[in-house]
Image: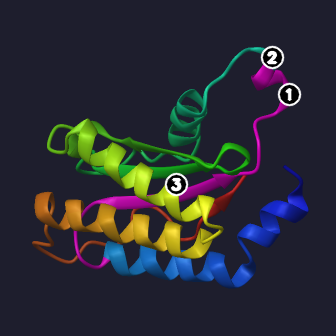
Amino acid sequence: MTRWRLNSAFSRRSLLAIAQAVHESHQSHVGQVRFAVEGALHSAALLKGKSARERAIEVFSDLRVWDTEHNNGVLIYLLLADRDVEIVADRGINARVSACEWEAICREMESEFRRGRYEAGAVGGVRTVTELLVRHFPVTRFQADELPSSPTVL
C-alpha cells in the first residue's frame, strides 16, 4: 500500500469530514474517540507475524487513548491494505459494550471500505461508536476534549 493510495482513499477533505464527525461526537458524551488509518504494516511487523489487532493495541497505547478521566477512550483503527478495522476500547466502556457490538461496527465499516466508500465508512463508524458512548457515558457537564479530534494517518 503506497502513500499515494492511502492519500487517494483518505483525501484531505475526507480527513476533515472524519475530524468533524469525531468533534461532533465529543460534544454528545464524555467518552473520547480517535480514528487512525495505516496503509500497511511495516515489513518487520509482517515478518514477526503481527496482526492488525496487535497493531491496533499498540497504536491505542501510542496515541494514549487509554489516558482519559473515565477510562472510556475508543480507538477505531483501519489497516487499509487489508481493509481490516479493529476497535480497541478502554476498560470503562469495554465493561459496558459487548465484543459482538464492537465487531458489528467493524464489519459494517469494512463492508463500506470494500465498496471504496472510505469517508462514508469512517464517518459511519464514528457515528455508531458515538451512539454507544451516548448510551453509556452521556454528557452530565461540560467536558473539554481530552484527545484530539483529528484522524491520525500512520
- Say which residue appears at 38% left-offset and 51% top-offset: 74
Give the secondary structure at mark 1.
Answer: helix
Q: Residue 32, percent across and down?
A: 35, 60
Distance, label 1 to label 3, CA atoms, is: 23 Å
Amino acid type at image mark 2: Leu
Amino acid type at image mark 3: Glu
Of the image marks 1 and 3, the number of the one nearer the N terminus: 1
Query: Which label number is shown at residue 47?
Result: 2
Query: Quadrant of the rendered structure where residue 89 is?
Result: top left
Query: Which label number is shown at residue 43?
Result: 1
Name, please, the residue furthest toward the front.
115
Q: Which residues are magenta?
A: 27-46
**Given this view, does label 3 or label 2 mark the residue nearer the observer?**
3
Whether pointer 2 and pointer 1 mark residues with C-beta atoms closer than 8 Å, the reply is yes
Q: Residue 79, percent across and down?
A: 65, 46
Of the image marks 3 and 2, the number of the one nearer the N terminus: 2
Q: Vertical placement of 40 versus 119: above or below? A: above
Q: Is residue 137 left or right of residue 108?
A: left
